[in-house]
Image (cartoon, grey):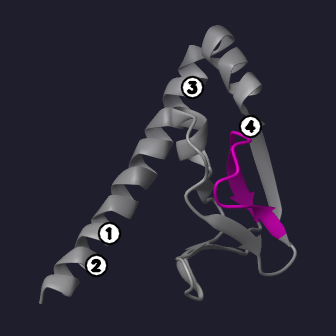
Amino acid sequence: MRVYARRHSQWRLFFGSRAHERAHRRARRKPKKRVSALTDGTIFGEMGLLDGAPRSASVTASRDSVCYAIYAGQYADLQAHNPDLVATLLGNVSRQFSSRLRVANIMIAELDQ
């Protein structure tokens, strides 16, 4: 079951609870390539919510999963009425970005070898 598709622009942030999803991309005329396995506690879809750009990958559930979503309008309401919660949320998103960037840096370094 597709959670969302690459280039889709409905901005929402997902929290995986009992999550079993795969993020994948397809380059022109090439097969799909898995870019991430999403598990319990994973946040995904955050980049589109934060910068308004279309999705950079598709996400598909590999089996029954539970995800919760915050839509752009709900996020704006949280910013206005509960900035402390938004600060905590952004701290968690930042830690996840940091972790993803470290993994990407390792992969890039391995390509150079």
Which image quarter holds the C terminus? Answer: bottom left
Vertical placement of 4 versus 91: above or below? below
Image quadrant where residue 11 sits: top right
Q: Nearer the viewer, mark 3 or mark 2?
A: 2
Point out which mark residue 32 bears.
Answer: none
Residue drawn at the location 39% of the way across and 62% of the way down: 100
CA gap, disc 3 and disc 1: 26 Å
Dot 3 corresponds to which residue?
86
Residue 37: x %, y % from top left: 59, 76
Q: Earlier in the sequence, mark 2 or mark 4?
A: 4
Residue drawn at the location 55% of the way across and 41% of the way down: 53
Dot 1 corresponds to which residue?
104
CA gap, disc 1 and disc 2: 5 Å
Vertical placement of 63 versus 101: above or below? below
Q: Earlier in the sequence, mark 3 or mark 1?
A: 3
**Amino acid carrying mark 4 in the image:** Ile
- Residues rendered magenta in the picture: 2-17
Q: Nearer the viewer, residue 99 or 60?
A: 60
Dot 4 corresponds to which residue?
70
Residue 27: x %, y % from top left: 52, 77
CA gap, disc 3 and disc 2: 31 Å
**Amino acid carrying mark 3 in the image:** Val
Mark 3 residue crowding within 10 angstroms, few (<14) / some (14–19) / many (20+): some
Say which element carries label 3: helix
Residue drawn at the location 55% of the way across and 58% of the way down: 56
CA gap, disc 4 and disc 1: 26 Å
Q: Locate residue 102 relative to residue 63 in the image: left or right.
A: left
Q: Residue furthest top?
A: 80
**Amino acid carrying mark 2 in the image:** Met
**Amino acid carrying mark 1 in the image:** Ala
